[in-house]
Amino acid sequence: MKPSPEVRTTLGTGPTESGHTPSARSALRLREAAHKRLPRRWPSAGTTLAVAGGTILSLAPGLLPRTAPAQAVLTSVLIIALLAVARIARFARRTGSKRATDGARRTCTVHSTGAQADPVTVHTTGAQIDPVTVPLRRGPAVRICRSHSNPARGRRLSAPAVARSGTFGDPAAYQRRAVVAATARVPGTIERRSPGVVAAAVDAPDATNRRPLLFAAATAGVLGATAHAALWQNTLRDAMDMARTGPGYWLCWAAGTLLLTVTLVTAGSWIGRVVRRIGWSRGLVMAVVAGLPMALFGVPVPGGASSSADPALVRPAVVTRSGSAESMVSWASLGREGQRFVTTEPSGAVRVYVGLQSAPDLAARAELAVRELDRAGGFDRSHLVVAVPTGSGWVDARALRGFGARFGADVAVVALQYSRLPSWATFLVGRDSATASARALLTAVEEHIATLPDPPRLYMYGQSLGALGGSAVFAGAEEQNRRVCSVLWAGLPGGGGPQPGARSAVLANASDPVVHWSLDLLWRPPDLTAARRDAPTPGWLPVVSFVQTTADLLGALGTPPGHGHRYGSDQGTTLPACA
């Protein structure tokens, strides 16, 4: 085992007015001066930057108004994420510093005289080590040797002087109590080995002296970001006819952020201590064992309710709707979204819906949809719309009302469910199912109307993931114009406009985060060529816009119609006419 660096103390003799030795008196004076003039502890630069950066990033302008709890959750999550990054960076820096240490030994001697004004001086005796003298304000001077020996032994602090309470003569507490020179210019380490000796470590010149300035700058930045966020939130709310925010909103946000951040940090610290005690491998096994029963039995399938019946809806009595007594599709197999679809006005229009439980596979569901259309009289209408639902099977009722306003009762709308998951989950794990379902249904309908002497005009409609899946059916404008009269896509993920030469319309709100969001948003602005400016939109910033848009996805449907991801009856009325 390597011997620890030595610190030799030479005590002077002189008057002792209070019964203390001269060196002890000098040390006490130094501690008292530091206690009076300097804060006990400033947050580290990494912590300050993480908290301020996470807060400012969360308050950057977004697309939609947010509730105070939602804003608090976003702020807390970003703070925790940046704190984790700062911790990883600190760990990497310390690991590199330990590896770079050459293990050289340094010897320092402390001299002190009895005069009250005499300085406490640290002299170096190691080879090629130059001392540096730095004065404390209204206090003694301290010389710190240029040394990197065993820097991991003491608590790594930085200049200026930071004093901790406690007895200087307590060797067991030297890692927690230290005094560092006010404006040290060089890195160094001094370790306590006897009473009256100052234990200190310096790892960056003037780092601690910059902490108050950094903290003040970060506080000013957070206050400025909060003021700008309040102005931006009210601007969005005015444009969307929503209530403005007030002081209570921001007090709730600040309290929620503080409570959630402290809770998460405490929980993370506790989990870290447990994992370090039992080991990472055992911790991972315990987490898997604890989470497996909940994953299998305790957590319902997201969007699973879409396959269950809605007791508030009444089974249709007309023969033109699926789920009726004459229908080939049972009422229960429609699921919640299918039941809503077939009970939407106007009553004279044909509504055909086939749920996931209505037939065993995709081909069977497409065939069943065609037979159900034939039974309900859908092919006798002049207009037939193939609607591609979202991931949960939802078709916007406002679009159905728009088709009714456009065509009256002389229209049939057919939809095929392809997933039980919400659109965001289906987008991540099964977006191809939307395209496969739309292609199968359109092909089956085309094959049937090809046998009719007077076929209806065929249209296609989709919103959100339905628009993404439906648009992928056609290889280009020429194929689209040949197979259908026209199409309408609402809230197309990732944005974009209609294909040149195609009879198609694209509805996109500038405030819709679904239209903005894609991985490309990290490094380039979104394609808003087809977007209508329904509200002010912030300028694009790398990374920042991606974070804000991702957060806005959670509230995309919480806005009034015509804003966010909510579209009106113009989804039906703006459907282009046939050539």
Image (tube, rainbow, N blue to C red):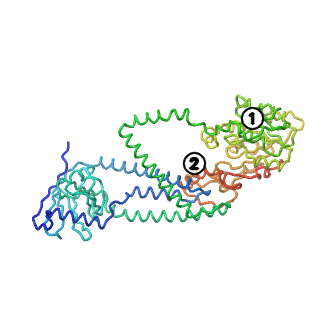
Instruction: Find the residue positioned furthest to the right.
Output: 453
Disc 2 residue crowd, few under 14, some 14–19, many 20+, Cα 10 Å: few
Residue 86 sits above or below residue 368 on the image:
below
Q: Which mark is residue 533?
A: none
Say which amino acid is labelled 2: Leu
Helix, strand or loop status at disc 1: strand
Residue 121 sits above or below residue 96 on the image:
below
Q: How many marks?
A: 2
Residue 14: quadrant of the picture: bottom left
Q: Which mark is residue 354?
A: 1
- Image quarter where the N terminus lies is top left
Which-is-in-front pick, marks 1 and 2? 1
Residue 10, visible in the rendered structure: yes
Residue 378, visible in the rendered structure: no
Q: Residue 86 appears at what percent x and percent y?
A: 41, 52
Q: Residue 253 appears at what percent x and percent y?
A: 53, 58
Say which amino acid is labelled 1: Val
Q: Which mark is residue 519?
A: 2
* Direction from residue 324 to residue 392 in the image, left or right: left
Disc 1 residue crowd, few under 14, some 14–19, many 20+, Cα 10 Å: many
Q: Report how far apart the C-alphas of labels 1 and 2 lie in the structure.
A: 33 Å
* Direction from residue 547 to residue 261 in the image, left or right: left
Q: Residue 371 appears at what percent x and percent y?
A: 81, 31
> Which residue does the image show at 46% across and 48% down from the upper left?
264
